[in-house]
Amino acid sequence: MSPLNLVVDQLIAPEAAPRSTVATDPIALEGLGDFLEILQFLIREPSVVGSEDSFFRVLRRELEEVGAVVTHYHGVLVAQGRRPHELMLSAHIDRHGLLCTGPNEFQYAAFIAGNQSELTGDSVSEQMLNTIENRFQGQRVQAHLPYTGTYIGQGIITNSYICPERHNLIFEVEGLEYLQPGTPVSFLDRLQFNNGYISAQLDNVISAAIIIFLFRCGFEGTALFTAQEESGRSWRYALSWFQRQRISTQRLVALDTSPYHSREAADEQLVTLRRKDASADFAPGITQELADRCTELAISYSYKDDYIAAQNLTRPKPYSLGRTEMGRLTAATDGSVTGTTLQIPTTEYHTATETASLASVSAVIRLLQTFIK
């Protein structure tokens, strides 16, 4: 028995059952050991926004081993089975991190000056910048060569603050004074287990792990892995592929995590769906199909746009619906390339301790497995 299968066995044992009702169903947690091994492995691989090349190569190797046809284009890796048009999945694979931008100067990689033309101010990432400003003190980080991902050193964040002139988070890092501008620096990340929950920088490596696991289970559709979602560019790479292939679809499902302000709010549903974002309405057909399959599987779900609307009734400054990859694709193509989102509820969004329930992870996997014939 693998160590991770042992962890799952302990999680579903009666004496180890977590207090939260979302993670107490043994059936929901069966078979997660193999998935967690994939996730644990991928989390250790760097994929800082704008420096995803080495992670693309890791994905390619894993997918080709299970027989997928894999093609790498600029900004997007595409894996296809024998029924590529039946269902299309997408997941961005970039993760937040730092970029060395000068002598002993480090900035939040997603919001460096070169990316700010793509940012409109109403994405979830941008709106949360002030919230996460002070979360990084004491965080260990590691530097990598930009293309190869080769490890070149480790340091620790001693301070972080928002620079009003550069509109970005600035970090003070001890131990990486020798780095050259353009060097990516990732958070030192390991998968943690705690009473029915997992924690790491899950956004959005967890979705990449789910897709690899689905291919191992026999998924025969298409999966797109996109770069630079956190800097607002990923939809352009996906769009370029659809245009290159002259493909239209109403059945693209974007996998991601979805932030909630508390554990109680996150645990009110196993799965988060969306009907729309700030850019466009999503495809109602596939959105309803996912909801119907959730009902058939007794998986609790809610709509994030409804949740945000309810929250805004009591807020002086309303939350944005956010601008997602799906919404931007839909708007840019007038709905010829569209679909919906399927998300895992999490807390501690955009940190190295983003947390999800194992029951939610299992529910998303079970839901997607219903598309495997």
Image (cartoon, helix red, strand yellow):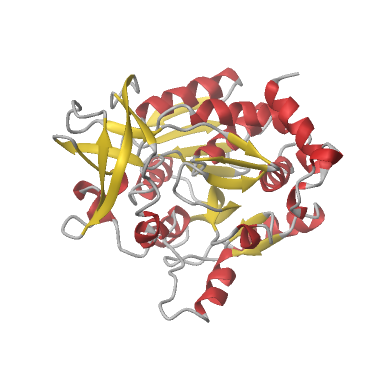
Residue 335 shows in the view: yes
The answer to which quarter of the image holds residue 216 is top right
The x, y position of residue 360, in whole percent, is: 68, 48
Residue 31 shows in the view: no
Which of the pair 278/169 is nearer the observer?
169
Which of the pair 18/333 is nearer the observer?
18
Which of the pair 369/119 is nearer the observer?
119
The answer to which quarter of the image holds residue 88 is top right
What residue is drawn where x is 67% and y is 46%? 364
* Callout count: 0
The x, y position of residue 70, in whole percent, is: 49, 26
The x, y position of residue 38, in whole percent, is: 59, 27
Q: Is residue 324 above or below residue 320?
A: above
Q: Quadrant of the C terminus?
A: top right
Of all residues, the one furthest to the right in this rendering is 14
**Could you tell whether 171 is left or right of 34 in the image?**
left
Of all residues, the one furthest to the left in this rendering is 103
**Could you tell whether 8 is left or right of 96 in the image?**
right
The x, y position of residue 129, in whole percent, is: 35, 57
**Could you tell whether 105 is left or right of 339 in the image?**
left
What residue is drawn where x is 43% and y is 76%? 318
**Could you tell whether 367 is left or right of 206 in the image?**
right
Q: Quadrant of the N terminus?
A: top right
Q: Is residue 219 above or below residue 360?
A: above
Q: Is residue 81 above or below residue 338?
A: above
What residue is drawn where x is 24% and y is 29%? 176
